[in-house]
Image: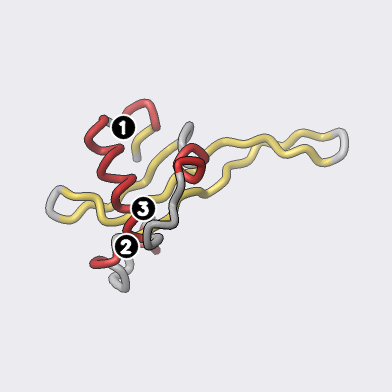
């Protein structure tokens, strides 16, 4: 697991490419922004990321009550690696 602050520029580019591939180019800058600020789980094969998910802290308001929670964001597996359980791992 890596925090957003610990992602290198090269890894961030690789993850964006992975998610664009996983979502058939339907993964926007806003989608990526929602995936930032938390923890990233990445599965690599041969030193390259093939699956990704992030958990981003959020606050929910339930009436007067505020509840800390985490949203699961940007879950995707590269098209060439789909069907092998990597998405389940992340």
Query: Residue 61 location, x and y as percent?
Result: 78, 37
Q: Quadrant of residue 21?
A: bottom left
Which tag, 1 or 2, sits closer to the chain's start? Answer: 1
Q: Secondary structure at mark 2?
A: helix
Residue designated by label 2: 86
Mark 3 neighbour density, 10 Å: few (under 14) some (14–19) many (20 or more)? many
Say which mark, if any, is on residue 66: none
Query: Residue 3 location, x and y as percent?
Result: 39, 32
Q: How far apart in space, not on screen, are marks 3 and 2 (Cα)?
A: 13 Å
Residue toward you, 87 or 22: 22
Residue toward you, 78 or 29: 29
Q: Secondary structure at mark 1?
A: loop
Q: Which residue lies at the image location 46% right of the left edge and 35% below the top edge?
A: 36
Q: Residue furthest left?
A: 46
In the rendered structure, are the residues bearing label 3 and label 1 in contact, judged by CB atoms less than 8 Å apart?
A: no
Name the quadrant of the C terminus: bottom left
Name the quadrant of the N terminus: top left
Which tag, 3 or 2, sits closer to the chain's start? Answer: 3
In the rendered structure, are the residues bearing label 1 and label 2 in contact, judged by CB atoms less than 8 Å apart?
A: no
Say which mark, if any, is on residue 19: 3
Above or below for 24 versus 42:
below
Residue designated by label 1: 7
Query: Residue 33 location, x and y as percent?
Result: 48, 37
Q: Which residue lies at the image location 50% right of the left edge and 48% below the top edge?
A: 73
Query: Residue 26 location, x and y as percent?
Result: 44, 57
């Amino acid at each position: 697991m890596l925090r957003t602050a610990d992602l290198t520029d090269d890894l961030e580019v690789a993850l964006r490419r992975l998610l664009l591939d996983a979502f058939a180019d339907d993964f926007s800058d806003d989608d990526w922004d929602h995936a930032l600020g938390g923890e990233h789980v990445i599965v690599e094969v041969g030193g390259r990321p093939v699956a990704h998910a992030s958990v981003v802290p959020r606050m929910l308001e339930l009436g007067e009550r505020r509840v800390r929670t985490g949203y699961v964001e940007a879950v995707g597996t590269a098209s060439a690696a789909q069907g092998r359980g990597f998405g389940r791992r992340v």
